[in-house]
């Protein structure tokens, strides 16, 4: 019998907790028999949600955690003081080797701090970047970093590029992924001090396929497979993606409902339009892994429903099976 992949789910994390995390966990169990789920949170509330569903009880356990870290709490203080929170308790299971991955839609700041302080970085990894897959016209690209390291150094970005390449090749299946650094122009001499320092270092890396700079307008076109930047720029890109996508969807719906003729046309194109919009929805691609840690930590969007939680859980399978952490150690020549 194959060894199960043990995934901890923060049942109290996110705007729709505990309903969405529990429902998503049950759906993930039904879709893949390789996983076992540990739901961490207030046991009575979690059990009440589980009672709504039929599932393989032998593959689910509940670990009680009475505290919840709110989105507005100072992350470092919350992680240090709320030892019985679902985030801290869940991450400790990963740290102790009792679980392979931790998935949460909770406080981004607390998850980033907890990943570093509780789970810990792989020895030699300078910073752990948050790396979501973002949709493009060609499929997906990895945006690294999108929120973990605002004041990054050139050496950090080089490691981000290498870890991102490993992830895209082994998880997404893109051979020799194209790596680019976010810049305000394609010319090598352009950019701020950080970009100018990092660019030649990336050029010297013979273990990545560095193609140079990428401007923001070329990201949605699939101009590169791994988009490298520090977290301030990455977070702006990610939030603009989300906001622009929502605005365009609203404008399309408004236009289609503007007249009788457009309403008739809307009925005809609805199936194709729905499928196209779905492929460009970032939530379809799971959560954002915090790369470079000793165990896998995946951050799902705070507003995630059960479908997004399920996708985030299932993406942990490939990460574990492909031994991404071992590949990172080997590539970065770490102990």
Image: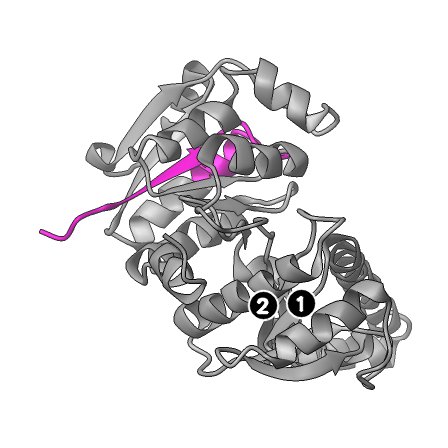
Boundaries of the magenta span: 1-23
Residue 32, placed above or below residue 178: above
Q: Position of residue 12 (x, y in %)?
A: 53, 27
Is 149 displayed left or right of 239 in the figure? left
Residue at x 42%, y 49% (from the top left corner)? 313
Whether residue 146 can be seen here: yes
Residue at 41% x, 44% y is 294
Q: Which label sits on residue 18?
A: none
Q: Quadrant of residue 24?
A: top left
Residue at the image point whose x is 31% and y is 46% from the top: 29
User: Mark on residue 161?
Assistant: 2
Label 2 vs label 1: CA separation? 6 Å
The residue identified by callout 1 is 228
Q: Residues within 10 Å of mark 2 (few under 14, many from 20)?
A: many
Q: Is residue 21 magenta?
A: yes
Residue 83, percent across and down?
51, 16
Give the left or right position of residue 135, taking residue 33 as reference. right
| Proximity of marks 2 and 1: CB atoms separated by less than 8 Å | yes
User: Per the image, is 8 magenta?
Assistant: yes
- Front residue of 132/33: it is 132
């Amino acid at each position: 019998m194959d060894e199960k992949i043990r995934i901890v789910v923060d049942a109290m994390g996110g705007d729709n907790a505990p309903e969405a995390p529990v429902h998503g966990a049950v759906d993930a169990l039904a879709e893949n028999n390789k996983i076992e789920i540990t739901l961490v949170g207030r046991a009575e509330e979690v059990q009440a949600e589980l009672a709504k569903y039929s599932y393989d009880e032998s593959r689910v356990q509940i670990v009680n955690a009475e505290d919840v870290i709110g989105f507005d709490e100072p992350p470092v203080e919350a992680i240090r003081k709320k030892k019985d929170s679902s985030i801290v308790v869940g991450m400790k299971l990963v740290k102790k080797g009792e679980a392979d991955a931790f998935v949460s839609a909770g406080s981004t700041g607390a998850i980033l701090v907890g990943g570093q302080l509780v789970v810990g970085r792989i020895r030699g990894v300078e910073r752990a970047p948050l790396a979501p897959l973002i949709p493009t016209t060609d499929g997906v690209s990895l945006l690294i970093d999108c929120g973990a390291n605002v004041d990054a150094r050139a050496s950090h970005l080089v490691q981000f590029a290498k870890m991102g390449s490993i992830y895209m090749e082994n998880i997404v299946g893109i051979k020799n992924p194209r790596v680019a650094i976010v810049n305000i122009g394609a010319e090598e001499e352009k950019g701020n001090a950080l970009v100018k320092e990092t660019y030649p270092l990336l050029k010297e890396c013979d273990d990545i396929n560095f193609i140079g700079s990428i401007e923001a307008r070329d990201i949605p076109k699939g101009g590169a497979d791994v988009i490298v930047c520090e977290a301030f720029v990455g977070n702006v890109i990610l939030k603009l993606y989300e906001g622009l996508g929502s605005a365009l969807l609203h404008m399309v719906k408004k236009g289609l409902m503007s007249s009788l003729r457009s309403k008739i046309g809307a009925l005809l194109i609805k199936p194709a339009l729905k499928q196209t919009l779905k492929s460009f929805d970032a939530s379809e691609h799971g959560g954002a892994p915090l790369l470079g840690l000793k165990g896998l930590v995946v951050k799902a969007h705070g507003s995630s429903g059960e479908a997004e939680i399920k996708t985030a859980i299932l993406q942990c399978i490939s990460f574990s099976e492909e031994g991404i952490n071992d590949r990172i150690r080997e590539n970065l020549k770490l102990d």
